[in-house]
Image: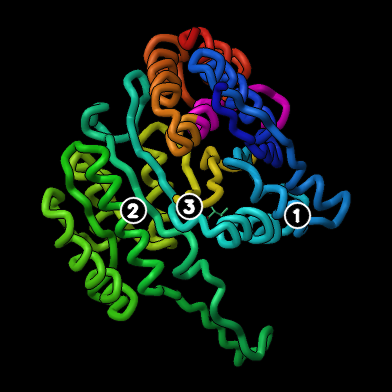
Amino acid sequence: MSKQYDIAVIPGDGTGPEVVAEGIKVLDAVALKHDFKLTYTQYNLGGDNYLATGEIVSDQTKENLLKADAIFLGAIGHPDVKPGILEKGILLNLRFEFDQYINLRPVKLYEGVETPLKGKKPEDIDFVVVRENTEGLYAGAGGCLKKGTLDEVAVQESINTRKGVERCIRYAFQLCRKRDKAKRLTLCGKTNVLTFAFDLWERTFNEVAKEYSDIKADYAHVDAICMWMVKNPEWFDVIVTDNMFGDIITDLGAMIQGGMGIAAGGNINPDGVSMFEPIGGSAPKYTGQQVINPIAAIMAGQLMLETLGEQKAAADIEKSVIKVLRDDISDVGAGKMGFTTSQVGDLVVGYIK
Ligand code: IPM
Ligand code: MN
């Protein structure tokens, strides 16, 4: 009997549902070709649902999501909901509660896609950022005193545990070995200033590195990393970093690989339920217009299949996306593709058959 995967789908807000539909179209096409089954259960989480029902994400929903093999997410963010409520209540909540401790963000420039970096070619921009996804400044530790007065104090602390840091670093070393490219893992930190947090990171990194003598273990400060990502992105193979730095450098990464229309990410719990998403937002002003590039969502599906162990099907998606980017669409930006969102999905499917 062919393998079956239960996928929980959270289309979310704004243009999320449009791009998720294309992701599913492509997933179905490769599943058919490679003889496995995908079943989908849809969850209407997001701004509209919150405004209508007051529910952010219920315990029952979480219980159901935990039974899935993976979660496929569109976008969360609604113009009528105060910033932070949905992001913290849904996205971060699921990352934390499902212990998706890796945020995996490939940065790869495909042929036919324009990068703002002058003179850089696809062979120069091909690395992966492994972002710690459950700790650091995102842990929510801290508080405030005398709010709203002139004596107000606000403290926001970065939580770094040996366990959390080590499992993230180990994942990065393993990934670097598996990628089998330059075999260089760069720790991105700030050891010259954050002398507690990044001392823990650096010591753990150096200890784990001893078990991976085939990998060149490298270190750079986060500010320097930003500089090199622009000037010499070809120096990077795999970068591992904490939650906050990872958040920042992966937006930079998304830009040098052609923008939010392309960039995908996975929130991964290697022993549990992982969640895959295009990393761009819900782009509310474009809702329903069919102008958003669905490649990022399609590549999120590709990452999902890779993580589920369907390597051949995942490779097929990437190959087809490469052709569409190289030969078909004129630009990756919203409204500039020369095709609608749905037509881009059809183009990818066309190469899969
Ligand atoms: C991301 C986003 C989120 C983050 C926001 C929406 C909470 O920017 O996935 O990178 O900061 O992690
Ligand atoms: Mn971000």
For the residues labelled 1 and 3, the Cα–Cα distance comes to 33 Å
Residue 281 lies, in percent from the top left, at 59, 42
| In-image side of 49 versus 321 (left or right) | right
Residue bearing the label numbered 1? 81
Instruction: Note whether residue 285 is visible.
Output: no
Asked whether residue 232 is in view, the answer is yes
| Residue pictured at 29% horizontal, 69% vertical | 201
Quarter-wise, where is residue 344 in the image? top right
Q: Is residue 220 left or right of residue 308?
A: left
Residue 5: quarter of image: top right
Q: How far apart are marks 3 and 2 (CA)?
A: 12 Å
Up the image or down, 151 lies above or below 190; here it is below
Residue nearest the observer in this picture, 234 or 136: 136
**Residue 101 x, y percent position in the rendering:** 46, 58
Which numbered disc flags the more N-terminal residue, 1 or 3?
Answer: 1
Q: Name the residue under label 2.
A: 171
Count residues near mark 3 (Cα–Cα under 10 Å), then give few for <14, some for 14-19, many for 20+: few
Q: What element carries label 2?
A: helix
Q: Identify residue for label 3.
A: 271
Q: Which is more N-terminal, label 2 or label 3?
A: 2
Q: Where is residue 95 shown, x and y percent of the image?
A: 56, 56
Q: Give the amino acid type for the residue marked by disc 1 in the picture.
A: Val
Magenta residue check for 114? no
Upstream in the sequence, badge 2 or badge 1? 1
Question: Residue at (53%, 59%) from the top-left corner?
Answer: 99
> Which amino acid, mark 3?
Asp
